Image (cartoon, rainbow, N blue to C red):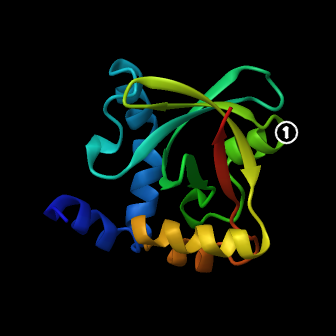
Amino acid sequence: MPMLPRLARYLGHRRWFARMGRFLVPADRAVAKLTKGRVVALGLLPTLILTTTGRKSGQPRTQPLLYVRDGVNFVVIGSNWGQQGHPAWSVNLLATPDAVVTLDGRELPVRGVLADGAERERLWQLLLTVWPAYQTYQERASNRVIRIFSLVPR
């Protein structure tokens, strides 16, 4: 693994990194928009753009997310950097499961399926291979179960 992704994975466990990451997401979103989804997270980690429908507004809402492949599906997690509340995109996806993934400049319609039970545990282990800090985020967000979704191509 190249040095920068390895360093990011190491730093991901630090509280200051999570705080900084929350502020960098809008910039990441802007870069992704300018490059039509070709550059996300500076290309350091596997990242897609998820576009959901706002639960209250009905407007498209975009969010860059780390992901892992599970066959043809994309697996994403609502870690919210270990905060106590669920991220808005996960609430939107529960309300309206149809969404769009943008990856490498291409859009793909998907349906979000919330994982539970043994399937959730299997996907959790896959996600930890990409970003081990998810374990730290779960410990910080101890009052909630972090949501994991399979994004199934439609």
Counting other residues with Cα less than 10 Å from the Cα at mark 1, is it few (<14), some (14-19), or many (20 or more)? some
Residue sitting at x 51%, y 68%: 126
Q: Position of residue 73 (x, y in %)?
A: 58, 48
Q: Residue furthest front?
A: 71
Q: Position of residue 97 (x, y in %)?
A: 78, 38
Q: Amino acid at mark 1?
A: Ala
Position of residue 63 in the picture relative to residue 39 (left or right): right
In the foreground, 147 or 14: 147
In the foreground, 94 or 57: 94
Position of residue 20 in the picture relative to residue 134 (left or right): left
Q: Position of residue 130 (x, y in %)?
A: 41, 64
Residue sitting at x 53%, y 53%: 71
Residue 127 vertical position relative to residue 50 in the rendered view, above or below: below
| Residue wearing tag 1 | 95
**Displayed quadrant of residue 27:** top left
Instruction: Please say whether residue 131 is visible from this viewpoint.
Output: no
Residue sitting at x 15%, y 61%: 2
